[in-house]
Amino acid sequence: MLNKESKIILCITGVSHFSVHASMLIFPAIMITLQDCLNVGLDTLGWMYMLSSFMFGLGSIPAGFLEKKFGGRNLLVVFQIGASISGLIIIFANDLTIMTFGMMLLGLSASIYHPAGLTIISRRVLQTSKAMGYHGIAGSLGLSAGPLLAAWFASIIDWRFAYFTMIVFWVILSVVTVFLIPAEHISVDVKEKITPKRSILRPLITYYFITSLIGLAFTGFITYMPIFFSNNAYSFLFINDKIFAGGIATTIVLIAGIPGQYFGGKWGDSYSKTRILFITCIMHVPLLLIFYYGSGLIILISGILLGFVHFIYQPIGNAMIAEYTSSSSRGIGYGFSFFLSFGVGSIASGAGGVLAVQYGVSSVFLFVAFLMIIATIASVFLMRIT
C-alpha cells in the first residue's frame, strides 16, 4: 500500500505529467489550421515542432544536474512558471519566428519535468514499477487530452484557447506544488530500496540506444497521426470536420495507452523487464505497417493496439533506469534518457515532414516501423547481457 507521502507525490507529479504531454500534443493536432494561419507548408511546421521537441529533450540533461542541486519541488515550479510564459508568447505570436521561439521555450520548460518528477518517485516510492505505471497513466491522459482539446478549440473558437487553458492550469498547479509537495525527505521504506552504488553501464548504454530508437518512432507517429487521421478517419467516424475527426481518432489511440501504462507497471514488478521490452518492441512493427498498407477502420483498430503496446514500455523503461543507476546519478540518468527520447527523437518530426511532402503522410509510419525493427534486435542483446 502507498503511504500518505507517496500518494501526495504521485498526485502532484501525475498532474504535472498530464500537463506536460497535453501541452506538447496541442501543436500536431492543429497543423492543418496553422498551415492556413501562418501560410506555411507541412514540412515547415514539421521542422518547427522538431525544434520544440528537441528543446524538450535537450533541456532534460541540465535539468538532471540541477535536480541534484536544487531539488525536485523547486524544479517543478520552474517548469510550471516557464511553461506559462511560453504559452503567452505562443498565444500572442504574430509571425512564424515568434511562434517558433514560443514553441522552443515551451519545449525547454517542459523538459525540466521528467528528471525532477521521476527522480522524486524513484527515491521516495517503494513500489517503483507500480508508481511509474500510475504516473504514466496520468501522462497518457495528457497525451489523449491534448489533441482533443486543441481540435475542439480550433473547430469552435480559436486554437489559441487550447494554450490559454494550459496557462491557467499551470498557474494553479504551481501554487499547489509549493504548498503540497513535502520538503526533501525520504521515508524509511524507500531507504530500504536496493539500488546500485554505481551505475551499471553496459545494460544502461544498451537501453539508451533502444530508447533513442523508440523515441524517434514515437515522435514520428504521434506528430503525423492527427493529420493522417484528418485525411482518413472522417470517412469511418462520420465526422464532417476533418480536424476534429483527426483529433478524436488520435485521442482514442492515446486513451488505449492508459491500460498499457497500468499493465506495464504491474507486469514490471512481477516479470522480466527486458523480456517485456523485447515483446513490446517487436509488436510495434506490424501495427505501424498497417498504417502504410491498410485502409478504413482497420487503421483505427491498429492504432488502438499500438497505443496499448507502446505505453507498456514507459513504466518498464523508467524502472529499468532506476535499477541501472545509482541514487546520486538518478536525475542525470533520467535527464539523458529523455534527451534521447525527445531530443534525438525530435529528428523524426522534421524528417517526417519531408517524407510526408514527398511520399505522403503514410510513409512516415513505414519509416518508424523500420526503426522499431532495429530496436527489437537491440532488445534481444539487452536480454542476453542482463
Image: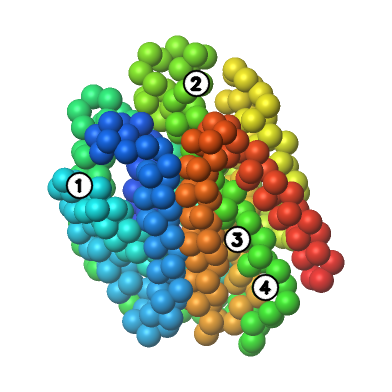
On the image, numbered disc 2 is attached to which residue? 233
Which secondary structure lies at badge 3?
A: helix
Which secondary structure lies at badge 4?
A: helix
Determine whether, in the image, residue 205 is placed left or right of residue 346: right
Look at the picture and state if 141 lies above or below 213: above
Q: Which of 362 and 108 is in front in this view?
A: 362
Give the mark, 2 or 4, whose residue is nearer the N terminus: 4
Q: Tell which residue pokes out farthest to the front in this image.
A: 358
Q: How far apart are marks 1 and 2 (CA)?
A: 31 Å
On the image, numbered disc 1 is attached to which residue? 95
Determine whether, in the image, residue 224 is placed left or right of residue 269: left
On the image, numbered disc 4 is attached to which residue? 205
Please state which amino acid type lies under the numbered disc 1. Asp
User: Which quarter of the image is occupied by the N terminus?
Assistant: bottom right
Q: In the rendering, which numbered label is found on residue 212? A: 3
Which secondary structure lies at badge 1?
A: loop
Give the mark, 3 or 4, whose residue is nearer the N terminus: 4
Please state which amino acid type lies under the numbered disc 4. Ile
Give the mark, 1 or 3, whose residue is nearer the N terminus: 1
Q: Which of 51 and 283 is in front in this view?
A: 51
